[in-house]
Image (cartoon, grey):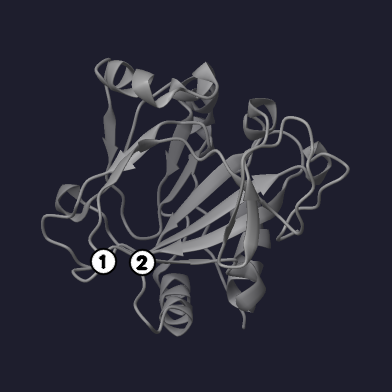
Amino acid sequence: MVLTFEDKSGKTRRMNFETEGYTLFSSVLDESTLEVLRQEFRRLNSQSTAGIRNVIAQSPAIAALASLECITDLLLGPERQPVRSLLFDKTPQANWPVAWHQDRTITTKERHEVEGYSPWSRKAGIDHVEPPAELLEQMVTLRIHLDDTGEDNGPLSVIPGSHRKGKIPPDQIPEIAERGTSSLTCNAGDVLMMRPLLLHSSRRAQEPSHRRIIHLEFAELAILDRQLNWAES
């Protein structure tokens, strides 16, 4: 499957990424590409579930998306590879609120007891573990929007700069949230780049319709402990 992209990423906005923990790039994908990805989304999510894991392994189209220049050009610093991939959709049948949290786990091909990597869990047949904060601080997440997401459709909210506080205990989150949050409305084709440790949440949609997101996490492969292997690399 051939994917074509119109690159309108607005790279000059990168200057805010390290301090705020996120940057929104407008109109990265054109409508023809979005429709290809929506069709692929429908194929993968034929049961209309809220989310699907490990989608790069299931979709040549999404694997191609993750390696295209207009996507990889958004990433900062050293060369990174996709190490985790998910699909999310918020619909009338799956209209869920998400509390403030950080993305603190990674996926591996196998489980080994390694110092600094804990706790372990297993979801959809894949091993998950919480690595040291230093590893998470080097990762970058891209959230690729296939639909418009306005204030009534449960957009992502973030706490700017919270990624610089490391792993935040849950009882400290309410105080941090009082210092200011940002609601990130997006258009189809926009890409949100964020740090995994950035505190984020989303409300239940007031007027739910599709809010399809391709969630890709990128990292340098070598930052993982030598006893472990990335699940999706």
**Which numbered disc covers residue 42?**
none
Q: Is residue 55 visible?
A: yes
Quarter holding the N terminus is bottom right
Q: Image quadrant of residue 119?
A: top right
Q: Is residue 156 visible?
A: no
> On screen, 148 above or below 16?
below
Q: Position of residue 122 (x, y in %)?
A: 60, 58
What residue appears at the point 14 percent right and 52 percent down from the top-left corner?
A: 152
Q: Position of residue 92 (x, y in %)?
A: 18, 69
Residue 190 vs residue 3: left or right?
left
- The residue where tag 1 is placed is 94
Q: Nearer the viewer, residue 106 or 207?
A: 106
- The residue where tag 2 is placed is 50
What residue appears at the point 20 percent right and 67 percent down from the top-left corner?
A: 209
> On screen, 115 above or below 90?
above
Quarter holding the C terminus is bottom right
Q: Earlier in the sequence, mark 2 or mark 1?
A: 2
Residue 52 vs residue 81: left or right?
left
Describe the element under mark 1 as helix, strand or loop.
Answer: loop
Residue 164 vs residue 48: left or right?
right
Q: Are marks 2 and 1 in contact (CB under 8 Å)?
A: yes
Describe the element under mark 2 as helix, strand or loop.
Answer: loop
> On screen, 133 above or below 96?
above
Number of numbered tags placed on the structure image: 2
Q: Amino acid at mark 2?
A: Ala
Q: Nearer the viewer, residue 22 or 131?
A: 131
